[in-house]
Amino acid sequence: MNTDLKTIQDIILKAAAAAKEETASEPEPERPKKAKWPISCTVGPGLEGAIACESKVGYVNGAKGWLVYRGYDIFQLAAHSTYEEVAYLLIYGKMPRADELNIFKEKLFNYTRMNSVVRHLMTFPVERMSIMGALRLGVNLMRTEYSDLDMKTALPTSFDAISADEDTIDMETQPHVSKHATYEFKTKSRKSNQKSGREFDRTGGLETSAHLIAGLSCVAAAVSRIHKDMLPLEPKPALSHAANLIYMITGRIPTPIEERVMDISLILHADHGMNASTFATMVVASTLADMYFSIGAGISALSGPLHGGANEEVIRTLRKLASPQTVAPWVDKQLSQKGKISGFGHRVYKAYDPRARILGPLAALIIRQKPELQELYATAQELEKVAMSRFGSEKKIFPNVDFYSGLVYASLGFDDELFTPMFAASRVAGWSARVIEYMEHNRIFRPRGLYIGEFNKTYVPIEKRRHS
Ligand code: SDX
C-alpha cells in the first residue's frame, strides 16, 4: 500500500480509537432480537422514536456514535473496504467472494455506460435544471428503459396491508363505542411470501439496484458537465467506481489519494438507518410502486437542506463567512435568531457523527494540496470550535456528515451543486437494500394523524354564509 494510502488508513483507525474512548462510558446496546409485533415505543413529532420495521441492513447508535452496516463497524469498512464491496454487502447481505465482486463491478460498469439515457436527458433543458432535479428525471428515463427487468417477470402480488382505516378509530379520545378501540393486527405468522417476494428479490430488486447505483453516478456526472458546456464522458474500464465518478465529472484521472478519499466518502454515505430519504423510499415501495419510483422519492427527500442538502448549505455558509474572523459574530447572530447552523445536529447522534470524525481529517489531508481552499478549511475549523462552545455539552449537538463532506468534494474539484447528488449517488445502495429487505415482509406504511379538529359542524349554503 503506498504511503499516502497508509496515511489515510491510519487517520481512520486513529479516529476509531478516539471514538471508542470518548463514548466508552455509554452503555452497550442490547443484543438485537426479532420484534414481537405490535410493539410499544414512545413517539414524538416527526415520528421521532417510532420503530417502523426491523432490519439487518444497518444500525446507528446515537449515544455511542456507532454506525454499522450488516454487522461491520463503519471505521473498519472505511479503512479497508471499497464502495463496490460495501454496496454489495448492503444489498446482498454478505461480503462478496472475489468472483462475485468482479461480476458486480462489471455490472456496475456496464450500466454506467447508459448512453441512451444520457442522450434522452440531453433533449431536456437540463442546463436550467438542478442536478438533483435531473437525477429525478434520469431515474424516470432509466425506468422507461429497464422497468421490464422487474415488471415483466415478477410484479410482486399484493401483500398484507392494514385494513382498518385508523382515522375512523378516534383512539386519541375516549372511543364513543367500545371501551378500548382495538386494532386488528394480522396474527397469522408473517412468513415471507416465497413466490412473489423471492421473484422480486431475485430478478428485479438486485438487478435494478445495480442499474440505479450506476445510473445516479452517470447522470450526476453527465449533467454537471452539461452545466459547464462540456460533453458527458463515458467511464473507463480500468477505473474503479470512485475513480470513474471523479473522471466522468472532471475529465481527469484522479490521484490515488483522491480516488481513495472519494471511495471512503461513498462508503460513509451509503446507509444510515431510517433517515428521511430512506423512509420516503420505503413508503413508496410499500405501495408496490416499483424501485425506480421509490428511489425517485428518496432523491426528492434527500434534496432538502435539513437532510442531504445541508452539505451545500455548509459550503455556502463558509464562502459567505470567508475567514475565521467573521465566525463568532455570525454564530451569535444566527443562534440569537433561533437559526440553524448547517452541518450540525442530528436526530439520532448525541455524540460526534463517526462519518464527520473521518471526513474532517480527510478534508485536512487533501486540502494541503489546495491552497485556494485552505482559508475555507480554517473557517470551518473555527466554526466547529465556536458552534460547539455556544451549544455547550448539554445540548449534545456535534458536526454531522454534511459538515466536512462539501470541503472534501470541493477539494476533488467538484462544484457545490454536485455535493448533494454525490450523497444520493452513494445512498442509493442503502435505499435499495432496505427496499429489497422490506419487500420480504411488505406492509404498506400507514401511520396516524392526531385529529384535533372540530365535530358536528352544520352545513350552511354559501348564500347564507357570513363572510367571516
Ligand atoms: C443528515 O437522519 C439521518 O440519519 C440523516 C443523515 C443521513 O445520513 O441520512 O445523517 C444525513 O440529514 C444530517 C443532518 C443534516 N442537516 C443539517 O445539518 C441541518 C442542520 N441541523 C438541524 O436542522 C437539525 O439538527 C436536524 C434537522 C438535523 C435534526 O433536527 P431535530 O432532531 O428535529 O432537532 P431539533 O430541530 O428539534 O433541534 C433540537 C434543539 C433545538 O433547540 P431548542 O428549540 O430545543 O432550544 O437543538 C437545536 C434546535 O434549535 N439545534 C440546532 C441545530 N440542530 C439542532 N440549533 C442550531 N443549529 C443546528 N444545526
Image (cartoon, rainbow, N blue to C red):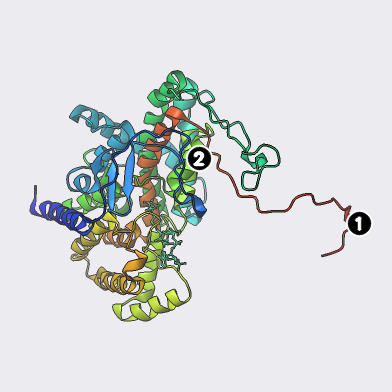
Q: Spatial distance from mark 2 to mark 1, Cα to Cα?
A: 43 Å
> Looking at this rendering, what residue extends furthest in the right direction?
463
* Secondary structure found at label 1: helix
Return the x and y of residue 288 as percentages of the image width and height: 52, 31
Figure check: 229 above or below 243: below
Along the horizontal axis of the image, is 329 left or right of 196? Answer: left
Return the x and y of residue 74 as percentages of the image width and height: 24, 47
Of callouts 2 and 1, which one flags the residue occurring earlier in the amino acid sequence?
2
Residue for badge 1: 463
Three-letter residue code for mark 2: Val
* Secondary structure found at label 2: helix
Whether pointer 2 and pointer 1 mark residues with C-beta atoms closer than 8 Å, the reply is no
Q: Quadrant of residue 416?
A: bottom left
User: Is 52 in front, or is 407?
Assistant: 52
Check residue 186 in the rendering and tell me which mark sits there, or answer none: none
Along the horizontal axis of the image, is 468 left or right of 45? Answer: right
Residue drawn at (21%, 49%) of the image:
75
Residue for badge 2: 283
Q: Is residue 231 visible?
A: no
Figure check: 203 above or below 309: above
The quarter of the rendered structure image containing the C terminus is bottom right
User: Is 64 in front, or is 26?
Assistant: 26
User: Is 196 in front, or is 303?
Assistant: 196
The residue carrying mark 2 has its beta carbon less than 8 Å from ligand 1: no
Q: Quadrant of residue 428?
A: top left
Q: Quadrant of ligand 1?
A: bottom left
Three-letter residue code for mark 1: Glu
Return the x and y of residue 307 as percentages of the image width and height: 43, 55
Residue drawn at (34%, 77%) of the image:
327
Number of dots carrying numbers: 2
Return the x and y of residue 140 as percentages of the image width and height: 50, 39
